[in-house]
Structure formats: C-alpha cells, structure tokens
Image (cartoon, rainbow, N blue to C red):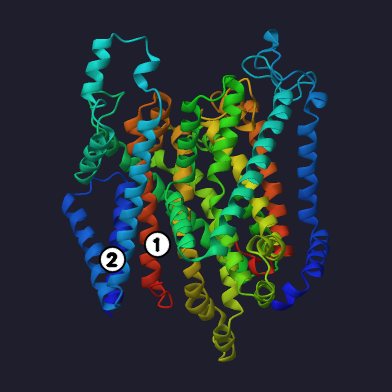
Amino acid sequence: MIEKVWGWVTAAFAIALVVMSFLDLEIPSPVWWLAGFVFIGGAVVFTAMRGMTMFVVKRLLEAVFVVFVIATMTFLLMRVLPGGPFDSEKALPPEVMENLNKKYKLNDPIFSQYLDYMGGLLVGDLGQSYKYTSRGITSIIAESLPNSIQLGVYALIISYLIGIPIGVIAGWKRGSRLDFSSMMVAISGQSLPSFLVAPIFILVFAKWLGWLEPALWEGPAYYVIPMVVLGIRPAAVIARLTRASVLEVIHSDYIRTAKAKGLNQRTILFKHVLRNSMIPVLSLSGPLAAAILTGAFVIEQIFAIPGIAKHLIQSVGNRDYPLILGTTLLFSVILVVSNLITDLLMAIVDPRVKMS
Amino acid sequence: MSAAVSSGKSLQSEAWKQLRANRVAMFSGGLILFVCLVAALSPVLSPYPFDEQFLDRVLASPSLQHWLGTDSLGRDMLSRLIYGARVSMTVGIVTALISLVIGTLYGAVAGWFGGWVDSLSMRVVDILDSIPSLVLLILVKLVFDALDVIDNPELKSLTGMLVALSLTSWVSLARVVRGQVLQVKQMAYVEAARSMGASGTRMVLQHILPNIVGPMIVLLTFQIPSNILSESFLSFLGLGLQPPYSSWGVLANDGWRSMTSFPHLMISPGVAIFVAMLAFNLLGDGLRDAFDPQMRGRV
C-alpha cells in the first residue's frame, strides 16, 4: 500500500518537474528539495523494506569505483599526451610559458598534480580551463549541463511515448499488415541518421509551416524538433523490443489461463500483457541513455544547443585538456547514474530480479 | 541445445536455406554487394575525379552533366558520393572485422580461463562500457592524433579513424563471445575432449569457436552499420576524416551548412547512409532469425 502511494507521488513529482521545465516555468528550490526527498527517501525506505540495502550499497560503491578509475585513466592520458593549447599559437616567450606552467601547476610532479585533481573532484572542482582562462570548468559545465539533461530526458520520454504504443500494437496484432508496416517503420527509424532527419524537420516545421524554431534552446518552441529528432532512433529500438516482449508474454501460460478463464481482451491486454511486457523494455533505459548521449553530440551541433557535448567537441579542437577531462568524466557519471537508476527501478518493479 | 551442437553442420545448412527463403534479407544482401562493388570500382564508375573543381559550375543543381549537382567548390557530387562509399564502406567493414578479432580473442580468453582472469577482464569491459561510445571514440582519436605517428595528414586522419573505431567497438562482441564460450564450455563433448587430453588452444579453436560462428556473423552484420554511422557522426562533427577525403559523413557535414538553399548537398549523402544502414540492419535481422533462433525478434 505504502509502496503504491510512494510510486504515485514519485510519478506525480517527476511529471510535474518535466512539464514545468518544458514550459520554462521557474521551479522554486523548495520543490526541488521536496522532490529529491521523496525520490531518495522513498528509495531508501523501499530498499530497506525489500531487504535490498546491501545490494544497493554494493552497486553504489561499484559505480563510485568505476568513476574513480575513469577519472584516473583520463587524467593520466591527458598528462601523457604531448602538446597543449599553448603550442599551437605563435611561439610564446619563455617567461610567459613559465607563468602559464606555474598557473596550471604543470611543473609539479605528476603524482601531486593527480592528488590535487582528485582532491578537487571530491569537492566538485574540476580545475581550470586552458582556453577560457578566467573560468573554472565546474562553472562552464554547470551552465550547460541543464540544457543537455533537458534534451536527453525529453528525448527519452518522447521515445517511450512513441515506441511503446507502436510495439504493443504490432505485437498484439502480430502477423497483420499493421504489424509488418510498423516494424518496417521502426527499422527505417533505426537506420535514419539524425543529420538527415533534422534538416527535413527544420525545413517543414520551422521554415515552411513556421510553427517551431529551427535552432537554439530558449523555450518550448525550441525544444520540440531537437527532442523528437533525438528520440527517433531510441523509439525505433523500443518499438521492436516491446513487440518482442509482448509476443513472449502472449505465449506464456498465465495469459493462456486468463483467456481460458474467459477474461475479455481489454483486461488481458492492459492488466496482464502490458504490465509484464514492460519489464524488459524498462531494463533498456540504461543502454538507451547511452545511445541518447551519443546522439546528442550531433543534435547539439545541428541546433546550436549550448550543452556539454558542444564543449567536449570544442575542447578537442582547442586541445583544452582539462575541459576534455571534465566533460568526459561528466558523461561517464551520467551514464553510470542512468545504469544505476535502471538497475534500482528493475529491482523495485520486478520482484524476480534478485540481487545478483 | 544438445541436438543443435551434435549436428552443427546440418544446422548451419538449415540456416542458409532459411536465409535464402527470406526475400527482404536477400535483397538487402544484394544491395550491400552492389554498394561494395560501386565502392571497389569507384575510379572507373565515377564520372569525374572526386577532387576536380568546376569553378564555373559552383553549387549547381542536379543536371544531366552532374546528376547530383555540384558542391560549394564545384566538385561533382555523384563522384564524391561514389568515392564516399569507398571510404565509408571500407571503414565500416575493416573496423568491424578487426573489432571482431579483438572481441573474440578477449571474450574467448575471459570465458575459457574463468576465475580471476574472467572477473578482471569483465571489470575492464564494465569500465569501458561506462564511457559513452562516441566520447571514447573521440578520446582514442585524440590520443592517436597527438602521438603523431604518420606524417601524411590525409592518411593520418583515415588511419586514426580505423584505429579508434577498431579499439572501441569490440566490447559488446567480447561480452557475447564470453557468454557463448561459458555456455559451450559446459557441454558434454567439450568435457569429453578435455578428458581425452586436448589442449586448451585446440579446444577453443576446434570445438568452441565453430559453435559460436552463427552469433558472431550476426553481430558482425550489426557492427558494420554501427561503425559506418559512428564514422559519419565523427566526420559530421568535424572530428573525423579531413577533406578532400569524402566519406558520407564528410559530405553530410558539408551539406547541412547550406541545406536550406541547396538541399541536394544534404540529401544525397543522407540517403546513401540511410539505404546502406537499412540494408545492413535488414540483412542482420534475417541472419539472426536464421542462425540464432533464440534471439528471434529481439533487438
């Protein structure tokens, strides 16, 4: 009972937050705090009730370890690489070089640089950029991260909204013309490169119809095209997996029992088939987050969205190693956290998933 | 499963038969062969050299002279597209093959030895999997470029792309191969071979690998389009191949900047990528249905 209430409250908060951010409404900080409290507090209580605390703690520690290893490896990589942003410009006077090295502590032994960096990470300081000399990387990222998260979350939601109904219908009406055509649409969607879809959407919805904005990231009219374009490939993947999952459930014994009991089609579909076939689809959220992160690079570039992918691309061009390091780390953290959330959700939704 | 293993040969011929009956997959396979042929014969087939500039016909629309028009430097788009097929297909196929070799070796070693070797290798795979693939790709490319092993800038950007894609795309293959090896290792006939004193290498090569050929072909077919797409993404972002090389991604990158005024520059490479990807995905689906019945209908 409590679990159900918590589920509804959490869902209500999540929907409210997404809708408010989409409409560009100012979200007061107490709402954030309350939402965080409901999410995290609920999850803690939940896992304790199910006896999964150890499992969750173990997964958390693993995640921290993975991020730590990635931070170490990327740090070493950036220090080992020859050259830097200061080489490409005209030869600098030695005194200037000396001062630059001093500013970025490049003369220190590498181990003490490493300790400095890791110490900074613990307090959320990602160091100084080589290029944007006056700004810390943390502040650069803090400015662009919300845009990227918005884009990714919207795309994920839209892909589930498109993919699940298509997959359910195709699976439910298996073998029909509807099934065949929706699967052709899905596999085409999976093969479409976003830089082909994006111009078409821009031409149709922004240029000819004038309903939406063709670029930038400043309000609902700006959000729609990028999120749909980014969501197409994941939606296709979801549709195909949903269909497969629905087919598997339909052939299971309990559905045969339900049919034998004489339940009507609607009840069987909504109460039994849908619920059970959503579990594998939900478990796909982690890999989908990875796909969306990758797709976001092209989307941010095409629509000139000021997100973190753009910073990573620019920093590669500028050989701004600290910024490359920071953005790489951030991308990994996002992916690790998405996988963690997916695992937790799976454990909560599906009682058969035991802590393995 | 035991029946499948004991009659491995006939199962494979059964699979080919099933594949031949799948018209969509066969058509896709034919299309892929056609694109490969065009790529191989590009110097003969393309009407103009891919870097020849017609300065009096800059940004021309499609015409009889230039079937797909010309780009902003007056180069024939059809020729560039044909040469682009060469680069894109080579990159996709070569990197998929290399990553197949790496992934198979890695997965086979992990699965065969088990124990701490397995746990350690899977930890490494977990960590690599926690970096988004495109980010990993960019990092490897960055390292390769910074190392400066090759002088020729054009060759360097192509080699860098091959190295980066090969080194980043083996992870999922390794996972699957490991799983298959673990499964096959339990089989009675492997146990029998072991008890007759077969060496580890011999058992992996003679008894285990032949039994996982099916899933590997399927994975390879899906890896190629994924690598073609990764290449085009990177080139699109300006981090991949450098002009005058024309891969489909490079062409798309050239095209989208002027797409509202000159859509033909954007459409032809985009459609080429789409058709190639679709053909590979459909063929992959057919192969999977034929070779890996358990995976049928899965993504």
Instruction: Report the residue marked by disc 1.
Output: A342
Q: Who's the residue at 67% across and 65% down the image? A: B203
SS label for mark 2: helix
Q: Is residue B75 visible?
A: yes
Task: Decide if residue A293 is on the left or right side of residue B154.
Answer: left
Q: Nearer the viewer, mark 1 or mark 2?
A: 2
Image position, residue B177 (x, y; %): 60, 60
| Mark 1 vs mark 2, CA separation in Å | 15 Å
Query: Which amino acid type corresponds to the residue marked 1 in the rendered image?
Result: Thr
Quarter holding the N terminus of chain B? bottom right
Q: Total marks drawn?
A: 2
Q: Do marks 1 and 2 share a chain?
A: yes
**Of the pair A98 and B137, the residue shown nearer to us:** A98
> Secondary structure under badge 1?
helix
Q: Indicate whether A202 appears above or below B13.
A: above
Res A57 label = 2
